[in-house]
Image: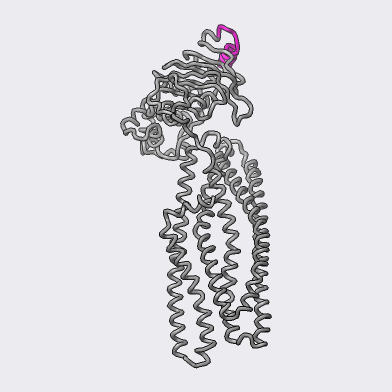
Amino acid sequence: MFKRFVAYYKPHMRIFILDMVASLIVSLVGIVYPIVTRTMLNTLIPERKYKMIVVAGAILLGLYIFRMLLNYFIQYYGHVMGVKMQTQMRTDMFAHLQKLPYSFYDNNETGKIMSRMTNDLFEVSELAHHGPENIIISSISIVTSFVYLSSINIWLTLIIFACVPFLLLISLVLRRKMRDAFAESRAATADINASLESSVSGIRVTKAFCNADKEQSKFEVGNERYTSSRSRAYKAMGQFHSGTSFITDIFNVIILIAGGFFLYNGVINFADYSAFVVSVNLFISPVMTLINFMEQYQNGVTGFSRFVEIMDTDPEKDSEGAEDAGVLDGEIELKNVTYAYDGEKDVLLGVDLKIEKGKTFALVGPSGGGKTTICHLIPHFYDVTSGEILIDGKEIHSLTMESLRRNIGIVQQDIYLFGASIKENILYGRLDATDEEVIEAAKRANIHDYIMTLEHGYDTQIGERGVRLSGGQKQRLSIARVFLKNPPILILDEATSALDNTTEILIQQSLDELCRGRTTLVVAHRLSTIKNADEIAVVSDGKIIEQGRHEELVAKGGVYSDLYALQFRNNQ
């Protein structure tokens, strides 16, 4: 994991080196003051060299101005470097998320993913900037200050140095508690983000059902967990800081006693003792910096670990030797297909079906029977557990996923529209389409006339998930998208089930136009919409239990006939 982290420094090596050099100079400038102090106490003041006192002060002032400029460079460019590294990590994560399979999103909430991309990577960027600076510069400062203090009095220096292991031991013990507490806190933050994202996205449902109190109570569960975990993290952090601060306070007591004893016995003079007291912070400060850095280190390492966890999730991969599908004719065949989500309970059990080129094949049956799963397997959103799926006689694993999906258009019940303009949403079907092609697609979807009544026409912003549009208008936009894509294979997964009867009739006209000349797989609850399908299959408990044309299935008097009779009676 360390090598992967360091790799993000490579594009910014020039800034990194300059930042380290600037930090090194800042730490070296810090040692000038005690040196000047010792020189004044031992030489300049006793010998009354007032001019040199002023010169030494002026030099010190100049160095401090120089250090101020270096500190500005470190704070500004160092943080910019960290942000650029964070930006690259976020870009890499986003690109990787685009390649992850459906199953990843089945098991990971949007809010948690967003938390990893924002909060976690912020902590990583802070570590990227301050980590090397704290480790390298503090280490150098400890060595140089130790050498300088030894030049004043080696024995007093060794006494101070002997106390450091106790400080490190306490910090290591307390650091483990802090690490675990902050890891739990990070998970709680992701949970509360997921809860918030879910509640905000569903705010209209909440208002419609007057369930604000329910959502509040659900949110408070996560909020309380966050408060509890954060409290434990701060408790561990408090123990860490108070414990380490106490040890450094002990240093001052030791210096006072041991230094006073040495001064009393003539082992050290008053000027050197004063300089030692002034200079000892040069040694203690970087030690404390390294110890206090542990908190930031834990946050950064935890954040990077969660980043790596996503980056190490296996992406969708084409099979070895997979070829570009080109333009498919659209003949689909499922041979003894079995599928189980997460390898557990089977959703499909030995399904066989064949859809001829340009024909319409309908799937009906009870919810949870496996109809939508079939729709997800054909574009290779999931891998079959056993059996095979062929298109134009080619097993879909032999085709690249991108080229396969390029040949398939999908219209679903749950329409997703982006928070952009009408034109941009239609263009999602084919990004290089011309304005004329976009308009033609909208006309064929029977949405053009409505668009032209809007003040900004095709440039009208439709809001998050198309909130400013009705259900029928959203569905027509999604149909326009598929018209623009112009695929040979079409999947309609309950595309009109959420619409009222009047809107459904209007949308059905657009769908009939869309299906013309394409191989179409239709999932429908309303049997009236698929009466004219070339073939109909009844799917129940993962199996095809009946198959044939509408008239044949009605005459058979089986499950389909019962479903049709029930719907026909309800429609009277």
Where residue 350 appears, as percent x and y from the top left, is: 58, 19
Where residue 48 appears, as percent x and y from the top left, is: 49, 93
Compared to residue 30, the image places residue 425 above or below, namely: above
Q: Quadrant of the C terminus?
A: top right
Magenta-colored span: 554-572
Where residue 85 appears, as percent x and y from the top left, is: 46, 53
Q: Nearer the viewer, residue 401 or 269?
A: 269
Compared to residue 545, the image places residue 148 above or below, namely: below
Q: What residue is drawn where x is 56% and y is 23%? A: 386
Residue 446 among those drawn in magenta: no
Q: Nearer the viewer, residue 540 or 319?
A: 319
Q: What residue is drawn where x is 62% and y is 51%? A: 183
Kindly tell me whether residue 231 is visible in this rendering: no
Where residue 565 appears, as percent x and y from the top left, is: 58, 12
Residue 566 among those drawn in magenta: yes
Q: How many marks?
A: 0
